[in-house]
Image (cartoon, grey):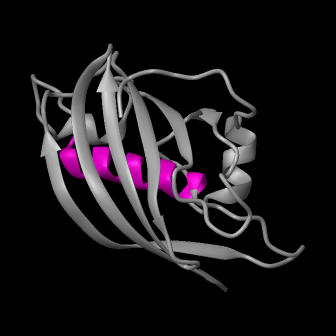
Amino acid sequence: MTDSTKTNSSSLSIDELLKILPHRYPFLLIDKMISMDPPPNASNWAGRRCTAIKNVTVNEPFFTGHFPGRPIMPGVLIVEAMAQAAAVCGYRPLTPGAQMEVLIAGINNARFRRPVVPGDQLKINVEILKDRGSIFTFRCEAFVGGELAAEAEMLAKSFSK
């Protein structure tokens, strides 16, 4: 993947994200989906690409202790932001009233390439590599100003509650 945003069919506002993700402040770590390719076909979404934005501000509660005098977004929270973007990318609407939950089952080849600091905007690119119904493999990359900040492959399991 590269840091490019294609013009495509849809995006999601924060209000729409709140209908999909169970996360709330201070743990909701994406602000908007700016692009979501349509699924390649109805039964297998492998190849679908999505892009999310996380605006990183000095007001984030974790900056108080990580690190005093040199605020850096913790790597584990960058991974969580990528996981939330991946969950939205793999989200399939259910019947009315049903709820879906997505849990991380594995994180592979996570790498952190540059610090993420207040004022940065993370652009998170997600690609669904494998779709096995309720088990997905995602390739995630987080960029700041066109520069790769973090990357990982994630395995996730979805199920209805």
* 80 drawn magenta: yes
Prevailing secondary structure class for the magenta stretch in the rendered image: helix
Quarter of the figure that contains the N terminus: top left
* Magenta segment boundaries in residue numbering: 73-89
Horizontal relation, residue 155 to residue 22: left or right: left
Above or below residue 36? Residue 45 is below
Residue 134 rendering spot, x and y as whole percentages: 55, 79
Q: Relative to the observer, which residue lies in front, 71 or 120?
A: 120
Horizontal relation, residue 75 to residue 57: left or right: left
Can residue 25 be seen here? The reply is: yes
**Quadrant of the image occupied by residue 41:** bottom right
Above or below residue 39? Residue 12 is above
Task: Report the residue at 58% width, 74% height from top.
Answer: 101
Residue 47 rendering spot, x and y as whole percentages: 52, 51
* 93 drawn magenta: no
Q: Relative to the observer, which residue lies in front, 147 or 70?
A: 147
Task: Report the residue at 11% width, 34% height from top.
Answer: 67
Task: Report the residue at 24% width, 43% height from top.
Answer: 151
Residue 132 rendering spot, x and y as whole percentages: 52, 77
Above or below residue 96? Residue 78 is above
Horizontal relation, residue 108 to residue 8: left or right: left
In the picture as drawn, the residue positioned furthest to the bottom comes out as: 161
Can residue 73 be seen here? The reply is: no
In the picture as drawn, the residue positioned furthest to the right comes out as: 96
Residue 86 rendering spot, x and y as whole percentages: 48, 53
**Quadrant of the image occupied by residue 2:** top left
Horizontal relation, residue 72 to residue 27: left or right: left
Task: Report the residue at 70% width, 37% height from top.
Answer: 12
Number of disc labels: 0
In the picture as drawn, the residue positioned furthest to the front comes out as: 41
Quarter of the figure that contains the C terminus: bottom right
